[in-house]
Image (cartoon, coloured by chain):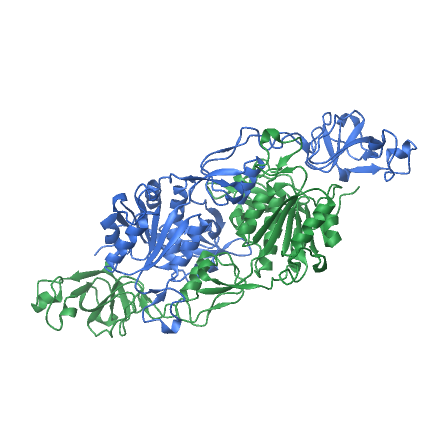
Chain colours: A blue, B green
Amino acid sequence: MKHPPLKPFDEALAELLACATHLPGRDAVATWDADGRVLVADAVSPLHVPPQDNSAMDGYALRCADVPAAGAVLRVAQRIAAGNSGLPLQPGTAARIFTGAPVPPGADAVVMQEDCEALPGAAEDAGEGAGPASAGTSTSADVSTLGRVRIHTVPQPGQAIRRAGEDIARGAVVLRAGTRLTPAALGLAASIGMDKLQVAQRPRVALFSTGDELVMPGELPPERMPPGAIYNSNRFFLRALLQRLGCHVTDLGIVPDQRDATVAALRTASAQHDLILTSGGVSVGEEDHVKPAVQALGRLDLWQIAIKPGKPFAYGHIDAAAQGGAASGAAGTSGPTHFIGLPGNPVSSLITFMLLVRPFLLRLQGVADVQPRFIAATAHFDWPKADRRREFVRVRRNDQGGLDLFAHQGAGVLTSTVWGDGVVDVPPGQTIARGDTVRYLPFAELMA
Amino acid sequence: MKHPPLKPFDEALAELLACATHLPGRDAVATWDADGRVLVADAVSPLHVPPQDNSAMDGYALRCADVPAAGAVLRVAQRIAAGNSGLPLQPGTAARIFTGAPVPPGADAVVMQEDCEALPGAAEDAGEGAGPASAGTSTSADVSTLGRVRIHTVPQPGQAIRRAGEDIARGAVVLRAGTRLTPAALGLAASIGMDKLQVAQRPRVALFSTGDELVMPGELPPERMPPGAIYNSNRFFLRALLQRLGCHVTDLGIVPDQRDATVAALRTASAQHDLILTSGGVSVGEEDHVKPAVQALGRLDLWQIAIKPGKPFAYGHIDAAAQGGAASGAAGTSGPTHFIGLPGNPVSSLITFMLLVRPFLLRLQGVADVQPRFIAATAHFDWPKADRRREFVRVRRNDQGGLDLFAHQGAGVLTSTVWGDGVVDVPPGQTIARGDTVRYLPFAELMA
């Protein structure tokens, strides 16, 4: 028997994304609650930010012409806090002003207070009182108690003034449709007054595992595990990753290695879900019942993808006509339900989820850029043995900002993905020598 | 007036972390629901992983001595699926075996099925039937229908066998106390049978903003905003970031710029929270009421931290004796409540949250390594103007894996933090030339 032909990773991803038509539903959610959701319409600013010229500092607003040299003294004629608006600034005067407060008409610069010196109140000059603490009784009291200020620098026109619309002009698109919202993006939307956002519906994902050898943690203690039995771990990380991607997750548990049970589970799940995701059961071994079960209800293609870890992968769908369940009418899905089968090996399952399923789920929600960009970083390790498959080796940044290799890349357990903080994407047939620049992808992005 | 002395960033972070004593509470949570939580006790494996020697492939288990040269033919004497256990392997025979199934006693290698050729059933040789599909009636039928197999390679001892305990030995610490749990860590805990985990309590955080100029989105449309008014954006991203850190968040809204209102808000919040977090109100301007309000109830230090953006920052606490609210008895906090005041400028507020508050909240939960490690990456930009402060400039990775600079670093809005995917940490007094290696921190880690 020959090695079967392997499908290049980029080809597999492109085929998968071509099947990921955007989900039709959209939700209007409070900006407050929209972290992680995907915008379905451009966010256009209805206003200038800042709304008017305002001070970038706590200090004094003035006319540059009044301060031709350092040391000039101006009368403080008004006081403008954030949230107030000022009066036109008379020549020869300054306005005490605070960060974010509107710059008064006539002022053309703000000098930060650290470069200014507040002088005793004007009241002293006018002989009307002992200082700023005494409330004057003359009609000029409100102003005269503000005193005078000495300016220790020569201001430049426009200094420390944020211009109206400088940051965001009215009509500008601040967030494009297809943006996945981060905390920063929520803040940006709020800053233009948007209290609601139109986002894509959450993908509904049904999750199950296959494998008679699998036992759920808590069901049996270690000493009572039968020979060959192992604890299920894949559903734990898959569920958490799906939730981080904003999915509604239905857990269907462990489906027995029997064709009828598998068909029944798929039929029920398909009625109410956009994607059925499983791990295990998709290798070419004769013990796999998932393939014929999906094929009985729709279509399934087994892919041997040229990546390591993560070779076996299956993509298909359940036909709309085959969808079961009591609620398969109006509340059900309108088209075929996607099916993705991941390898049973935990590391392979995790890697293929991050590299293939995550982009697929983001694209279902309308995200355009679904793959994180790599970072060109430095290998502090050797990788002398090339493979015909593209490899994703687990690494961790060291104190020098370079990448260290996890020693035991072949492991069937997740230790490497907990120890590491990312992967290096090693092209097929390539080796790595210490000091080489490599393509690094942080887990924080692949698991986000 | 002179420039005030600035506190170096590392000193500020160290002082802050020194105040972050671990929260006393701990929760026993289902592993299933523990994503993002912080482990408070080592997770020790009660078992070997894998539990016994097992096959890494679908293929045939055999004795290497029986295959001295490629092309040897063996009788297939048993069939072992994952979840089953095999019988001792007799010399001259092979066992059909599937990935994860226990290797039978006597076998010392597994050959992957791609390197094997299944031959017509032994039934043919024995004249007992037409092939593997016919059920034999003799006592040897169960075995004889398994046929024979030709092995096309010369196996090496141990090949494609995962040894018992090879990945995790019984008694090994698989996750250390102080680990923040990721999806991969949940999977790892599940794989050793842990269905519950001891984690630190969630920090309880009260959040408010100050500033009479602030309006909540949705309260007023843009055309009705009074002069000087701006939409509140900080609480939107702060809440989302706090939730990502596993905090219980209480939103106290916008507190008016009045000392009494501020004191009342602080007193109420302190009784039921571990941290009170505010943005705005902590600059040295006279409009700030937060500082005297906190000082009336405890202690507050204003720090001018030598970072850009993000200079003003306040850390303090509310004394236990000053804590108010009806429930300040047994259900309240037992010690002082932490207080952190962030700058009002959104970009400064976001940056100081990510660099200072995030580590503080992780440390409260017992995390040891609270700051993400930088990545040594390549600047595809020039940064010719050094600053006396350490700068965190917003950048984005390009298709070459290098870093592009956001053009308008000075902006008061969050556009740079949405456009960018991270920051470069520029030391005080340094410039950057295109091609330089710089310290890059991805937002995916700073916002996680």
Residue B66: give x, y in percent of width and height: 21, 71
Task: Work out which residue is located at the far right of the displayed protein and give it.
Answer: A127
In terms of image quadrants, where is residue B53? bottom left
Residue A320: give x, y in percent of width and height: 28, 43
At x 59%, y 31%, the residue is B222
Number of numbered discs = 0
At x 76%, y 41%, the residue is B286
Between residues A140 and A432, which one lies in front from this camera angle?
A140
In terms of image quadrants, where is residue A166? top right
In this picture, residue A135 sits left or right of residue B10: right
Between residues A26 and B393, which one lies in front from this camera angle?
A26
Q: Is residue A293 at least partly visible in the picture?
A: yes
In this picture, residue A280 sits left or right of residue B198: left
B194 is higher (above) or lower (below) than B317: below
In this picture, residue A208 sits left or right of residue A174: left
At x 56%, y 28%, the residue is A170
Q: Is residue A424 at least partly visible in the picture?
A: no
B173 is higher (above) or lower (below) than B181: below
At x 87%, y 33%, the residue is A122
Residue A357: give x, y in percent of width and height: 38, 48
In terms of image quadrants, where is residue A369? top left
Residue A283: give x, y in percent of width and height: 28, 56
B101 is higher (above) or lower (below) than B7: below
Task: Work out which residue is located at the far left of the displayed protein and give it.
Answer: B127
Between residues B444 and A226, which one lies in front from this camera angle?
A226
Quadrant placement of the N terminus of chain B? top right
